[in-house]
Amino acid sequence: MNICSIVSTHDELTLSLERHRGQSGSVNSFLVQTIGIDIGGTKIAGAVVTELGEIVAEDRVATEAGDSEAIIDAVVNMIERLAKGRDVPAAGVAAPGFIDVAQSTVYYTPNISWRNEPLRERLRERVAIDITIDNDANAAGWAEFRFGAGRLVNDMTMLTVGTGVGGAIVSRGALFRGGFGAGAELGHLRIVPDGLPCGCGAHGCIEQYGSGRALLRMANEIADVGGIGLALAETRKAHDGLTGELVSELIRAEDLGAVHALNQLGYWLGQACASLSAVLDPELFVFGGGVSVAGELLLEPIRESYRRNLPARGYHPEPEFVIAELVNNAGVVGAADLARIHLRASRSL
Ligand SMILES: [Zn+2]
């Protein structure tokens, strides 16, 4: 179900929304609109979002990845463009990396040279509305929980399987950030002692076994062996190398070698989920990111591996495994909703 169909199932809310559309909202009204900004590696996306997760305006610009000051300028300009002519009381900014628990300082961001950057203050100096910042995977997970695949549960764990592996945890209806704000970095859960080196400095993280990059490595290994890897090897030769898109095409065509690589990926992700269940016991695991377009072909080996590795299996209800629903907009929708919640909490103090 997408956001529009959620709205259509809530006739009263929809009517109320229609009646009030165009009127200015206040923080106490039902109809607060907030801005969500998602700083990605290649683009900065922004949107004005209603409390129902509905996007009413959008914007995007390319990210100047090497220039952290240019990124701040771009975010300020985007907030000003989106807020123009609207009563928008707050903006949430989602960024990759570690964010402190007060949602104000970026401890560390890969690809952007932010180190202990007081991003919230930097933005507040330049825009008139309330600012909150959050980790991008947390924002995407929160959007899934509120408006997507997780809207019917209280406890949800999301794994974003893109180039790397991101994570978000919702427990008892609240986003889990940890004591210092850097929790839920599920991509760096160790699943192989002394395993492959990871960009984080440790070894054996799930990011090295369950990510899009890992899928590509596995596909290349299968291509090297021949046999079921023949189509992978031929594709690699024809295109001067395999890409995520080429492997995805072969998976869609149910090529045995490509599906075998996906099964290996699912095996490791299922192991990680079994360990996560022992700690978090979620009702639902949600998978987002580029690799999740494989759908059931990804979920089946995850379920199988999970069942094989779950501690005390058979004495415990099993969670559901599903694909994320808000594929492209999750970051901005989640960041906007978190900004609204943060503003409401700060005004009720
Ligand atoms: Zn790691």
Image (tube, rainbow, N blue to C red):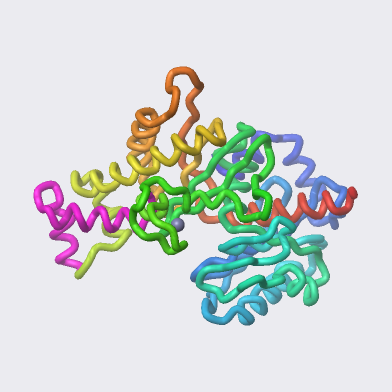
- Judge from the rendering whether residue 22 lies leftward or rightward of residue 172; answer left or right: right
- Judge from the rendering whether residue 261 lies leftward or rightward of residue 156; answer left or right: left
Q: What stretch is highlighted in magenta?
A: 210-239
| Residue 201 location (% of width, % of height) | 44, 63
- Residue 45 figure quarter: bottom right
Q: Is the magenta stretch mostly helix, strand or loop?
A: helix
- Judge from the rendering whether residue 85 lies leftward or rightward of residue 176; answer left or right: right
Viewer can see residue 72: yes
- Residue 133 figure quarter: bottom right
| Residue 192 location (% of width, % of height) | 36, 47
| Residue 321 location (% of width, % of height) | 46, 35
Of the pair 60 and 128, the residue shown nearer to us: 128
Of the pair 336 and 32, the residue shown nearer to us: 336
Report the residue that reaches farthest toward the left: 227
Report the residue that reaches farthest toward the top: 315
Position of 75 relative to 233 (above/below): below
| Residue 60 location (% of width, % of height) | 58, 69
Of the pair 65 and 249, the residue shown nearer to us: 65
Q: Which residue is drawn at 74% across and 68% down?
A: 120
